[in-house]
Image: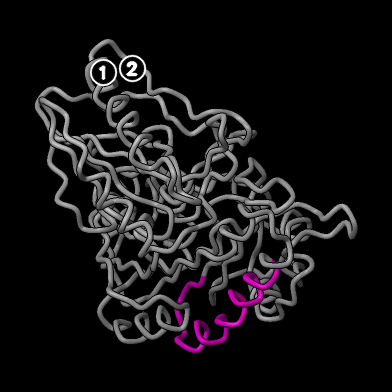
Amino acid sequence: MDLDLAKELAVTNDSKIVLYVIDGLGGLPHPDTGRSELESADTPHLDRLAADGICGLTVPVGPGITPGSGPGHLSLFGYDPYRYQVGRGVLEALGIDFDLQPQDVAARGNFCTVDEAGRVTDRRAGRISTDTCTELCDLLREIKLPGVELFVEPVREHRFLLVLRADGLDGRLSETDPQRLDVEPLPVQALAPEAASTASYVNQFIQEAKRILAGHEPANMLLLRGFSKHPSFPCFGDVFRMRAAAVAVYPMYRGLAKLVGMTVLPTGITLEDELETLRAHWEEFDFFFLHFKRADAAGEDGDFDAKIAALEAADAVIPALREMEPDVLMVAGDHSTPSVLAAHSWHPVPFALCSRWCRPDRTEEFYESVCAAGSLGTFPATEVMPLAMAHARRLTKYGA
C-alpha cells in the first residue's frame, strides 16, 4: 500500500498491534537432516499461533534480492525499500543517539581480523567485547585529517560508528567490506564525481587505522559500509495514525525505529527485559515493534544448533505476548539467514498473523515449507502493515 493511501484510509481506535520480528528468521535445510533450523526447533507456541491464525512467506525486497536489515525492516514497517533507502551508518548513529548533522556522512564499521597478507579471515573479529571495541575506538580517535572532523564511536561488540563532518561531503561511496573471506578489504571509491574528495578522506582514515590496529589481536583491521547522510522519511505514526513504540536491544534497530518516528523505549539486554518494557508501556501506545536478534547472529556465524536454540528462546515468549491480548499479533523476520550459508539470503521469510478477525488456514506448524502453503501465500513484506491495520479495524473502506 502506498503511504499516502494508508494515511487516507487509516482510522483511530483503541486496538493494539504487536509486530514481533525474529531477526534472520528463515533458514535452509541442514544437509544431514533435510530440515531447516525452524523445522528442527521445538516451537510449540509458534505452532499454536500459526494454527490459530494465518500464515505465508514475505519477500522483503524482491525475488532473488538479498536484503540488508535496513530494507528488511523498513518493508515490514510499510516503506517501499526501493524508494526509502538509508545507509547503515545513519541507523547506527541514530541507535546510539549520536547528534548527526545534515552535512555529516556516517558509516557502519566492523573491526575484523586479517592475516599477514592482509586478507580477511574473520569479518567480525570473533565478535570482540564492547569494552574492547571501546578501547580500539579510543585509539582511532587519534587520527586527524586536515579539512574534516572525525568521530569514532563504539556501538556494540565488533561494531562501531564512523562520522565525517565538513561542508561538501557526499555519501555516495562504495563499501570496503568484501562480504567474503580470504580477500583483502576493498578501497573506497566515489560512486559520483561529487564524492571524490569524501572517498579520499575515508581512504586516508583507513590507512591510518591500519597502522594503529596492526598488532592488535584479533581486531587488527576494520571494514566500512553503509555510507549515508540522514534522509527524511514520512512519520510512521502520522501515516498509520497510531502511537508507535519500539523495544529493541541493538542500536541499529533502535535507529531504524527512530528514523520512521517511533518512540524508542529504554530496555535491558535480554528478551525478558524487553517483555517487561512492553508490559510497562502497554497502555501508552497502539503499535509495538519488538525485536529479537540472536537467531540472525547464529545464522551469520554458521552455527545451526545455536540458531535452533535462539528460535526456541524466541518461541518461549509467545505465551507472554498472547497474555497481553493484543488485537493483532504478528511474527515476522526481516530476512532469512540460513546457517548453511552463514549469511543473509534471498529466500522468503515465514510469517504468521493472529487476530479475532482471521479466517484460520490449515497451517498447524510454523516453518518455511508449511508457511508457503498458508492462505497468505508468498507476498511482499510491504503488505504486512495493511494486513495488520485491517485486522485491527484501523482501515476504512476504499472508494465509493
Q: Tell me if I can see residue 16 in this picture.
A: yes
Kindly indicate whether the residue at mark 2 contacts the one at mark 1 (C-beta within 8 angstroms). Answer: yes
- Is 70 on the left or on the right of 160, as rendered? right
Q: Position of residue 227 (x, y in %)?
A: 33, 34
Label 2: element kind: loop
Q: Quadrant of residue 146?
A: top left
Q: Quadrant of residue 257?
A: bottom left
Q: Which residue is mark 1?
A: 195
Toward the front, the furthest residue is 215
- Is 133 on the left or on the right of 301, as rendered? left
Q: Quadrant where the N terminus lies? A: top left
Cα–Cα gap, marks 1 and 2: 5 Å
For image coordinates 29% across by 82% down, the residue present is 281
Label 1: element kind: helix
Q: Position of residue 231 (x, y in %)?
A: 24, 38
Residue 83 colored in magenta in the image: no
- Is 44 on the left or on the right of 164, as rendered? right
Can you say whether 279 is above or below 243 in the image?
below
Can you say whether 2 is above or below 258 in the image?
above
The boundaries of the magenta stretch are 308-329
Q: Tell me if I can see residue 259 in this picture.
A: no
Can you say whether 88 is above or below 154 in the image?
above
For image coordinates 36% across by 54% down, the residue present is 252
Mark 2 or mark 1, which is nearer the start of the sequence?
2
| Amino acid type shown at disc 2 | Ala
Say which mark, if any, is on residue 190.
Answer: 2
- Is 197 on the left or on the right of 25, as rendered? left
